[in-house]
Amino acid sequence: MKKFNVQRTPFLVPTDDGKIIEEHFGLASIPGNLSIAKMIAPPGWSEPFQTPEFDEYTFVIEGRKQFVIENETVVLSKGESIKIEAGVRIQYSNPFLEPCEYISICFPAFSIEKVNREEN
C-alpha cells in the first residue's frame, strides 16, 4: 500500500465569479480529512457572509485579501497568514485593484454543505 499521493493535476473547481480554485487535496480531488487549494481572487471579487463548520487557514502568495471577521476587518498582504476557527461568521473579498493569489487549507475538508453561506 502506497504511503503518499503526488498531486499533478488538481481539480479545477467550477465558479461563476471569476475566482480560480485548484483543489490539490479535498473531497473533489484526493479525498482525505483536510483540503488544500490554490486560489486566485480577481479584483473586486467577494463572497457572501458565511459561518463555516471547519477551520480555515489562508496564506497570501501575491496581492491582498480582505476578511470581515464578525465585525472586524483584517487585510492580509503577501507572506501573511491567518487561521479562522470553525463557527466564526466571516466574509472573504478582494476589493483591491490587483488579483490575490493564496493557499487555503480547511480542516476538516471543505464541503459546500458545511460553508453555511448567507443569502445576499
Image (cartoon, rainbow, N blue to C red):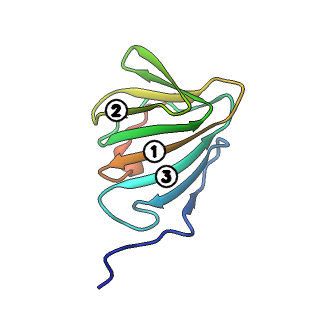
Q: Position of residue 105 (x, y in %)?
A: 40, 47
Mark carried by residue 37: 3
Q: Residues within 10 Å of mark 2 (few under 14, many from 20)?
A: some
Marks 2 and 1, Cα distance to the nearest angstrom?
11 Å
At numbered mark 3, what does the secondary structure look like: helix, strand or loop? strand
Could you tell me how many numbered marks the image carries?
3
Q: Amino acid at mark 1?
A: Ser
Label 1 belongs to which residue?
104
Residue 84, above or below 5: above
Q: Is residue 91 left or right of residue 1?
A: right
Question: Which disc number belongs to residue 82?
Answer: none
For the N terminus, which image quadrant?
bottom left
> Extreme bottom residue here?
1
Residue at position x 45%, y 63% in the image: 28
Q: Residue at x 46, y 19 (%)?
A: 74
Q: Residue furthest front?
A: 79
The answer for how far apart the CA atoms under marks 3 and 1 are is 5 Å
Do labels 2 and 1 touch, CB within 8 Å? no
Amino acid type assigned to the residue bearing label 3 in the image? Ala
Q: Which is more toward the observer, 37 or 63?
A: 63
Q: Which mark is residue 84?
A: 2
Q: Quarter of the image holding residue 70? A: top left
In this picture, residue 27 sits left or right of residue 18: left
Q: Nearer the viewer, residue 2 or 73?
A: 2
Q: Residue at x 72, y 25 (%)?
A: 97
Circle nearer the N terminus (3, 1):
3
Specify the farthest residue to the right.
97
Q: Amino acid at mark 2?
A: Ile
Please give the name of the residue rendered at 49% of the width and 68% of the height, measured from the top-left corner: 7
As drawn, 57 above or below 29: above
Mark 3 Cα within 10 Å, few/some/many (few <14, many 20+)?
Answer: many
In the image, residue 74 sits, relative to residue 28, either above or below, namely above
